[in-house]
Image: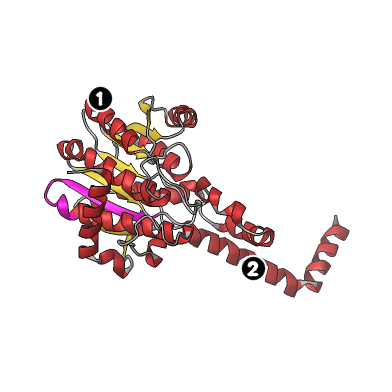
Amino acid sequence: MQNYAEAVRDFVEKHATGLTAVFVAGAGLLALRRWLAGGVCRSKVRLDGKTVLITGANTGIGKETALDMAKRGARVILACRDMTRARIAADEIRQQSGNGNVVVKKLDLSSLQSVRDLAKDVQENETRLDILINNAGIMMCPKWKTKDGFEMQFGVNHLGHFLLTNCLLDLLKKSAPSRVVIVSSLAHEKGRIHFDDINLDKDYKRQESYRQSKLANVLFCRELAARLKDTGVTVYSLHPGVIRTELGRHLFPSLALWQRIVAVPFVLMIKSPWEGAQTSIYCAVDESQANVSGLYYSDCAPKTPAPQALDDAAAKKLWDLSASMVGLA
């Protein structure tokens, strides 16, 4: 044992510089990982007797958000396209939360008829809606069209949620104080709304399309908040962070092999779905935000969005265009 201790001491003395470098690098990586994890929602508020609807809640941050809402005692509606996966997710949420009041409803955001069908279902069968979380999304897909002929990313990320929210406004107002949470992205900072070519038919670039849809989310939040002033319904948009979810399933396969190899260490450093859900949860429940509306959040705190996301004229113009596209009076 003494010989072993001496050998260790000798090794440490001979490699002191290298061991110090390794320790510092390790501590730095841990600190970076903690910083990248972002803020955490500390609110302990209960949601007993309240109803929460979350789109795309069968996986990723949507599922983690749904689990949190269920643990708080809410009736949680998972509005999803894939009913098989949604039912599996609902079972897991019931088991982990101890809350049996978790239900699944069909929603395909690429179909305006599906959106209307869900809204009708909720209006007819739910007595209240306290929190609507527009979480579902698609990212960096090829140039696909929705069932109604719209460009897929703009159609799913913005138009589907725009119609759903408008169809449920009466129930949200009836249930006030209530909240609408819109999951956007930091990508909105490089986005612009192509009012003259909203479906990007002239020159489709998947990154440009995604950025446009995420900017539309923030502008929608801003205009919706203005229209809902003094109704008791508050609105929030947010950047959840860069997260290990299925959202990048259309991006990763398109990368070159060397790019995938380089990306692996970075993937290990980014947020988990639980960490990514914290800002959505914060906007949905935190008491300190009860009387504010129309703001943009990141890491559980208000942040200033890009200048183009603060353009009230553009927000109104986008609203009018969206209403025309989805057939709202």
What is the magenta range? Answer: 226-239
Q: Is residue 238 magenta?
A: yes
- Estimate the x, y position of residue 238 in percent, counting from the top left: 35, 55
Q: Is residue 284 above or below residue 201?
A: above
Q: In this view, does 166 lie above or below 127?
A: below
- Estimate the x, y position of residue 269 in percent, counting from the top left: 57, 58
**Would residue 127 appear left or right of 65 to someone viewing this image?**
left
**Distance between the Cα atoms at labels 2 and 1?**
56 Å
- Estimate the x, y position of residue 78 in percent, counting from the top left: 38, 33
Disc 1 designates what residue? 125
- Where the N terminus falls, by quadrant? bottom right
Let me know if residue 125 appears in the view: yes
Amino acid type of the residue that numbered disc 1 sits on in the rendered structure: Asn
- Estimate the x, y position of residue 232 in percent, counting from the top left: 15, 45
Do callouts 2 and 1 mark residues in contact (Cβ within 8 Å)? no
Q: Is residue 100 above or below residue 35?
A: above
Amino acid type of the residue that numbered disc 2 sits on in the rendered structure: Ala
Residue drawn at the location 20% of the way across and 58% of the way down: 316
